[in-house]
Amino acid sequence: MNKSIQDNWEQIRERVAHACDLSGRQGSDVQIVAVSKKQPPEIVAEAAGCGIRCFGENKVQEAASKIPRCPDNLQWHLVGHLQSNKTRAAVELFDMIHSIDSTRLLERVNSMSAEVGRTLPVLLQVNVSGEVSKSGLSPEEVPPVLEASKHCMNIDLVGLMTIPPFTPDPVDAGPVFARLREWRDGWRDEFGISLEELSMGMSHDFEIAIQEGATWIRVGSGLLGERH
């Protein structure tokens, strides 16, 4: 077993627990996605040996070659942009998709899920900061997608995801996380969709995200080491 992954895992769980304590939340409120992009199956297996069960991939093609070579008792989340022509493979590979960014993609995921006979949990990616380099819906684009989701019987729209601009001081990401939570609360009331999950926060800023309501955090090299 890779000792450094074990050490990282324990340290990150301690940081999560501390952030939850500070914000009056339970540690069980926050789940950790170990982002394994560009990591070989051997690293995933070592991480699984430390008790890590949920892994995130950015690209469908990489996941398709990696997942069959990993332990079979793991959860896999797609946390990167989903190309429309990779939808069928994504629906077959992943247990959750964090990055739906259009009505068309939502409906395609729903159609492919129906074809393979499953109901797939998904999140909408919202580009809170408006960065042109990032994928995601603008806040104004979210309501029509929420409305369309009511007619999609083979997806379960469980929440929202965002990626803030990188800043040296993680506190600066706080307003981005807070806005997503506030919009979520408003959309939940308006559309009657629970949107319980907020996927936000990575290695350097997840404590701030937890304080603002994150239920999923995405941790990559800070947990699994430098990418190969």
Image: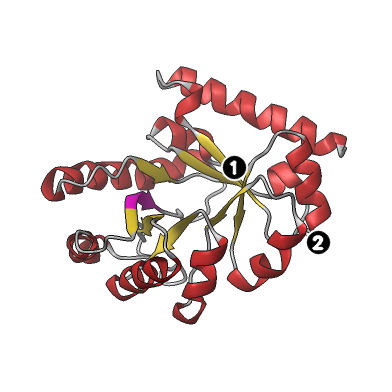
Residue 145 rendering spot, x and y as whole percentages:
24, 64
Q: Is residue 158 magenta?
A: yes
State which quadrant residue 17 falls in.
Answer: top right
Coloring applied to the structure: secondary structure
- Start and end of the magenta stretch? 157-161
Q: Residue at 33% of width from left, 53% of height from top? A: 156
Say above or below: 88 vs 7: below
**Mark 2 or mark 1, which is nearer the start of the sequence?**
1
Q: How many marks?
A: 2
State which quadrant residue 23 falls in.
Answer: top left
Q: Is residue 8 magenta?
A: no
Judging by the rendered image, the residue that carries numbered circle 1 is 204
| Mark closer to the observer (1, 2) | 2
Say above or below: 200 vs 142: above
Q: Mark 1, residues whose alpha carbon is within 10 Å: few (<14), some, or many (≥20)?
A: some
Q: Residue at 42% of width from left, 38% of height from top? A: 214
Residue 94 in view in this figure: yes
Residue 38 in view in this figure: no
Residue 198 rendering spot, x and y as whole percentages:
39, 44
Residue 215 rendering spot, x and y as whole percentages:
43, 37
Left or right: residue 50 versus residue 137 is right
Dot 2 lies on which element? Answer: loop
Residue type at the position of mark 1: His
Q: Quadrant of the C terminus?
A: bottom right
Q: Name the main secondary structure of what is drawn in magenta.
A: strand
Residue extending farthest to the front is 117
Residue extending farthest to the bottom is 85
Disc on res. 228: 2
Left or right: residue 62 versus residue 202 is right
Disc on res. 121: none
